[in-house]
Image: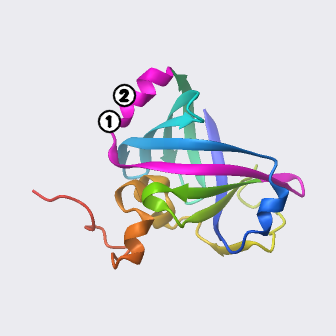
Amino acid sequence: MAAEIERKFLVAGDSWRALVRDRSRFRQAYLANRGTTSVRVRIFDDAAARLTIKSGKSEMVRDEFEYPIPLEDAEEMLALRLGAVIEKTRYRVPLEGHVWEVDVFSGENEGLVLAEIELSAPDEMFAKPLWLGEEVTGDPRYYNSELAVRPFKNWRDGTVPGDQDAGRETG
């Protein structure tokens, strides 16, 4: 088991693009999402897939279990999902001893751009590039599992991001 320690920010500008080292395209879906625990299937560049289980200890630290699975199984699992398929391109941006992951969302979450940095300790210091916007670490609206059931496009269409009943069936 590995602990994941990360901080997440909105991106304010695109000067990060000049620093990109590489990129990957993801399609992912959530098979279960309950409280602080989620089960996700992710397909990378239509070539490989992983099943991931995450369980939160705090806003910044989560246990993470991740396993490779056959691509064909992952494609079938997408049909079992809760909410929408998350589509995004992840760009890796090295900066002062860390690698930022900048996610540019498409599909239901088009227009959203987030940057994440993984740390070795919750209090680890890191350089904040000028293209970082507001920190959203711990804001559940920006969890991918939440974006699957309350897509970013709906926020601009009048849906209140914090509305716990938005987009859910009742009864």
Residue 92 position, x and y percent, is 75, 50
- Amino acid type at mark 2: Glu
Start-end of magenta stretch: 70-99
Q: Residue at x 50, y 20 (%)?
A: 70
Please say if 29 is above or below 155: above
| Badge 2 density bin: few <14, some 14–19, many ≥20, Cα 10 Å | few
Residue drawn at the location 42% of the way across and 29% of the way down: 75
Circle on res. 76: 2
Q: Which mark is residue 158?
A: none
Q: Which residue position holds label 1?
A: 79
Q: How many marks?
A: 2
> Which residue ends up furthest to the bottom in the rendered image?
158
Q: Is residue 143 above or below residue 162?
A: above
Q: Is residue 33 magenta?
A: no
As rendered, which of 118 and 147 lies closer to the eye?
147
Element under disc 1:
loop
Q: Nearer the viewer, residue 77 or 143?
A: 77
Tags 1 and 2 in contact by the CB under 8 Å rule?
yes
Residue 105 screen position, x and y as percent: 55, 57
Q: Is residue 85 above or below residue 65?
A: below
Viewer-proximal residue among 141 and 16: 16
Left or right side of 130 for 96: right
**Which quadrant holds the N terminus?**
top right
Tell me which amino acid carries mark 1: Ala
Q: Quadrant of the C terminus?
A: bottom left
Q: Give x and y (percent) for residue 95.
A: 86, 57
Q: Residue at x 42, y 58 (%)?
A: 108
SS label for mark 2: helix
Query: Is disc 1 surrounded by few (<14), some (14 to 19) or many (20+) residues within 10 Å?
Result: few
